[in-house]
Image: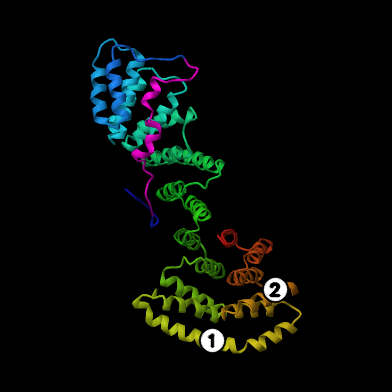
């Protein structure tokens, strides 16, 4: 069963019988060829014949035949603790190989109940029982076995992940987060990226609790891990819904557009309108034209969009014709404001090299009214030129701009972090 997170789908990690074979596949010959320094334990004569026959069948992968021998041994009187543990454990191996995981769990639980496991072997068996119980959807049992395996140091990073899932399935988000953090730390310690589902669980818990701050934190983590457009889309929608200033809303739309996470025609239309209002018809035209050419605009919005596109094209063409004059005026000006504006017009026209040149010149002169926008357009131009190191430098400069929106700054910082990935 899959779960929905703001339209995102994830499928919980499930174990399979093959994942259990490494633990359950104990060589039957090990019971008669133990070369360790531990005191050797042997099967008693009471069941020696049946165990020998079972071992032979197991070595030939005749699991059902082996079970018959083990059941015969189980019925014999006078068994030692080691006998009982061995019979139950061998049955567990056979049931795993036959993919009868419920019977395997019962057999291993019987083996543990004999008290015959050494302190060294018991943690491995707890881990196996944890995996079996999780597969068998016995969540409470699986959690207890998982705790025992973790306390004994035999739990892997994937086991810790499954513990987080089990707690989530029990609607215990607090403990799901605790075990999720343990799993994340374990993956990082091993030099591996954490699994996506770990952050998805945190996001789902925050969503279930209507915890907007928690949802944003989860989406930031997921973007850092995957850079998926679906996560960008959800994060930007959350950030945008609380924004009241058009300047900042337009900044947020620029990130949405540049991450290819804009998928609603209303977003394209509003962004184009805001760009037009800001005196950037060239960029506004490019944004709306992309929506129209991609068939994103809905039928009931096409007439309005077509009218807006035509109006923007007229203005964009006029801006493009005025570029030589604006360029000459900007170069003569001792202040950088005209250079910054020139760079924005070049950007809207798709001339990214001249955009970067003009804005860099303007920043060098100083006296730019909206310095945050200058750095953003410089960074975007460098991205278009695939000059990611220079783009990152430009976005980093946003931190030096007084009164820049913390929300906008954080989003551009994340965008910069993922450039080139």
> Which residue: 43% across, 28% down?
124
Determine whether 218 is above or below 411 in the image. Answer: above
Q: Which residue position holds label 2? A: 360
> Which residue: 62% across, 89% down?
322
Determine whether 220 is above or below 328 in the image. Answer: above
> In this view of the protein, which residue sits in the foreground, 330 or 109?
109
Q: Earlier in the sequence, mark 2 or mark 1?
A: 1
> Which residue: 49% across, 40% down?
183
Give left or right: position of 370 versus 65.
right
Q: Which mark is residue 411?
A: none
- Residue 230: percent from left, percent from top: 44, 60
Classify 10 Å Cα crowding around label 2: few (below 14), some (14-19), many (20 and above): some
- Residue 216: percent from left, percent from top: 50, 54
The extreme right residue here reads 334
Q: Is residue 45 magenta?
A: no
Quadrant containing the C terminus is: bottom right
> In this view of the protein, which residue sits in the foreground, 90 or 382?
90
For the question of whether residue 149 can be seen, the reply is yes
Give left or right: position of 362 versus 387.
right
For the question of whether residue 402 can be seen, the reply is no
> In this view of the protein, which residue sits in the foreground, 80 or 326?
80
**The residue stretch that appears in magenta:** 9-38
Q: Quadrant of residue 385?
A: bottom right
Secondary element at image label 1: helix
Q: Quadrant of residue 320?
A: bottom right
CA gap, disc 2 and disc 1: 25 Å
- Residue 294: percent from left, percent from top: 41, 75
Determine whether 297 is above or below 188 in the image. Answer: below
> Which residue: 47% across, 36% down?
156
Q: Which mark is residue 315?
A: 1
């Amino acid at each position: 069963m899959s779960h929905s997170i703001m339209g995102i789908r994830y499928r919980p990690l499930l174990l399979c019988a093959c994942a259990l074979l490494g633990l359950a596949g104990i060589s039957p010959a090990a019971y008669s060829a133990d070369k360790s320094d531990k005191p050797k334990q042997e099967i008693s004569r009471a069941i020696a014949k049946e165990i020998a026959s079972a071992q032979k069948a197991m070595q030939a992968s005749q699991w059902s035949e082996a079970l018959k021998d083990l059941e015969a041994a189980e019925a014999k009187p006078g068994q030692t603790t080691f006998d009982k543990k061995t019979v139950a454990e061998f049955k567990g191996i056979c049931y795993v190989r036959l993919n009868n995981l419920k019977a395997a769990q019962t057999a291993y639980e019987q083996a543990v109940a004999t008290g015959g496991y050494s302190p060294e072997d018991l943690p491995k068996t707890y881990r196996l029982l944890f995996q079996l119980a999780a597969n068998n959807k016995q969540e409470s049992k699986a959690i207890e076995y998982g705790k025992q395996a973790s306390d004994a140091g035999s739990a892997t990073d994937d086991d810790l992940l499954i513990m987080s899932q089990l707690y989530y399935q029990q609607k215990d988000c607090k403990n799901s987060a605790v075990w999720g953090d343990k799993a994340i730390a374990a993956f990082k310690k091993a030099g591996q990226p954490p699994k996506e589902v770990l952050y998805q669980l945190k996001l789902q818990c925050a969503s279930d609790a209507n915890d907007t701050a928690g949802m944003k934190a989860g989406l930031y983590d997921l973007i850092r891990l995957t850079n998926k457009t679906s996560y960008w889309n959800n994060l930007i929608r959350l950030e945008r819904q609380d924004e009241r200033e058009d300047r900042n809303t337009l900044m947020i739309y620029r990130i949405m557009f540049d991450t290819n996470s804009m998928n609603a025609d209303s977003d394209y239309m509003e962004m184009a309108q805001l760009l037009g209002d800001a005196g950037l018809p060239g960029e506004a035209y490019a944004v709306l034209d992309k929506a129209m050419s991609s068939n994103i605009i809905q039928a009931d919005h096409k007439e309005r969009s077509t009218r807006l596109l035509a109006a923007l094209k007229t203005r964009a063409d006029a801006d493009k014709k005025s570029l030589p004059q604006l360029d000459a005026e900007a170069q003569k000006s001792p202040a950088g404001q005209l250079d910054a504006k020139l760079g924005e017009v070049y950007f809207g026209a798709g001339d990214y090299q001249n955009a970067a040149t003009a804005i860099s010149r303007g920043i060098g002169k100083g006296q730019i009214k909206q310095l945050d926008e200058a750095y953003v357009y410089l960074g975007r131009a460098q991205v278009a030129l695939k000059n990611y190191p220079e783009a990152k430098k430009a976005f980093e400069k946003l931190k030096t701009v007084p009164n820049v929106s913390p929300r906008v700054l954080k989003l551009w910082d994340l965008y910069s972090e993922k450039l080139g990935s």
